[in-house]
Amino acid sequence: MSEFLSGEDVSIVLCGEAGQGIQTVEEILVQAVKLGGYNVFSSKEYMSRIRGGENSTEIRVSSKRVAAYVDRIDILIAISKGAIDHLEERISDNTIIIGDEKTLEDVERNDVIKIPFLKMAAEIGGPIFANIIAAGALCRVLNVDKEIFDECITAMFKRKGEEILQKDLQAGEEGYKIGEDFISSGKFNVKIKKDPKIRDEILLNGTDAVGLGCIAGGLKFMSSYPMTPSTPLQTFIAGHSTEFGMIFEQAEDEIAAINMGLGASYAGARSLVATSGSGFALMSEAVGLSGMIETPIVIYLAQRPGPAVGLPTRTAQEDLNLALYSSPGETPKAIFAPGKFEDALFLTHQAFNLADKYQIPVFILSDQYFADIYYNLPDIDLSSIENKKYIVETHEDYRRYEITANGISPRGIPGYGNGFVVVDSDEHDIEGHITEDLHLRNKMVEKRLKKFEGITKDIIEPELVGSEDYKILVVGWGSTYGTIKEGLNHLGRDEIAFLHFKQVYPLHESTLNYLEKAEMTIIFENNATSQFGNLIKQVTGFEIHEKALKYNGMPFSVEEVTEHLKSFLEMV
């Protein structure tokens, strides 16, 4: 039996071809499970195609809060014939495989349960109802009240009309009967504890958390061109634009998108662009424009494997260097990388304030894994949310690039006051007019770079998880947070702590002290060259001792983190 297998933590995986409705089942299950009073987590991996291929969704249901991906599969719902081959490396002797009798007709394994899902669905109205039957069976096994399941079905399918809704409810009823038979068989030992308070908790995905941070941060204008995995944020903002007084513009390309954003920011609107790696490459010149004309912009960079378009629907942490060294010349910037939903909300809010305060581009680095995961969490305390105003009313003698002690010139916008607001992408004088005065050029460069001194005072300190009396320090950033944290919990070693960076540039002044205190340091990154490890060495001179790097397009699993740490500990 797997050391991770527990009746209080069940990992369910649904696998099938694109177009077979896996996402629908996921949405029903995560909602039903949460409303049923259980902690839930889900993640997905999918191929870059509209039909065919093999896609899977993992749903963890647990007595404890979970926010990490595991390799372990306790229950596999095989919707397609290729599901078992696709997930072969994750299937163990403890995995219970459930599927349609025709889909699994060639599979000869003792752990396979063949159910006539398609035949039953056809009797109800068509094969589309097979997934609802399977979802109902799972919810019964998980002891989710039938009323809650029906509530979720009604919420999802009521818009399709009463006839379709009744058939879906009938499919769910049949699924619950199958689930009852599963329980009677004695194969399903699920002992997950219910907590009624969870029903009222928030269920979010990473994209929602960033989107809420945008709203909290006072976003008024977003322009973007669709590109996985940033597109869901664009959909979120567009869907809530009327409610919160925002404008969303789908641009013709990425170059137009970021320049639109800068135009809106020049006019005074807090602005955002969202893209992924090769899309952002087209924006890099405009990052320099933001720095030169000192006009703020927030850039949501949802990472995926490269180079070029790489693996469009997979995950990676490969674009730190791309963000860090984007734009010609030298300009201050800040880069955030949330690892949990609370951080995603507050960091995104902070990104808008920081961009406005220092008149710089600010990045939010996410990735496919973080953008798509779901889990429940309690209400978030928003009492600290405050949007500060940095725009000034101009006077007749206003000069946009006045040289100041802290490098921050008073920022005016057209129409607010009596002054002219002149900007130029070439080097310029204090009024904003183009210049080739080399002496003045030095002063302008020094003025812009002077902002670094202020930015370093606003850096967010990394989070230490575990004892302060550590001997071994694990380092991670961004989306690896939940997986590394759970991996360390499984080890249960008091001498190991985890340092998570939610701001990866500039680095907090405490970074070197944390690293030098440890006898061994270990970093986990989803890239091949340890981009963050190299940045730490460049800034602090400290080289992290051991590196665990994964770059096949999948996130680290809890099991992988644990095994890596065990192997490193054997070296001590």
Image (cartoon, rainbow, N blue to C red):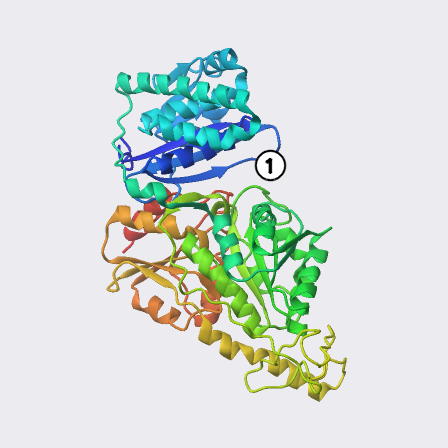
| Image quarter of residue 141 | top left
Which residue is pictured at 53% across the width and 57% down the height? 215
* Residue displayed at 34% across by 16% down: 110
The residue closer to the viewer here, 146 or 265, is: 146
Say whether residue 499 is left or right of residue 164: left
Residue 127 screen position, x and y as percent: 53, 17
Whether residue 556 is visible here, answered yes or no, is no
Which quadrant holds residue 88? top left
**Tag 1's secondary structure?**
loop
Q: Residue at x 76, y 83 (%)?
A: 436
Q: Position of residue 67 (x, y in %)?
A: 37, 46
Q: Residues within 10 Å of mark 1 (few under 14, many from 20)?
A: some
Disc 1 residue type?
Ser
Which residue is at a point 39% across and 55% down the rendered structure image? 380
On screen, residue 153 versus residue 518, left or right, reads right
Q: Dot 1 corresponds to which residue?
A: 48
- Position of residue 405 relative to residue 86, above or below, is below
Name the image quarter holding the N terminus. top left
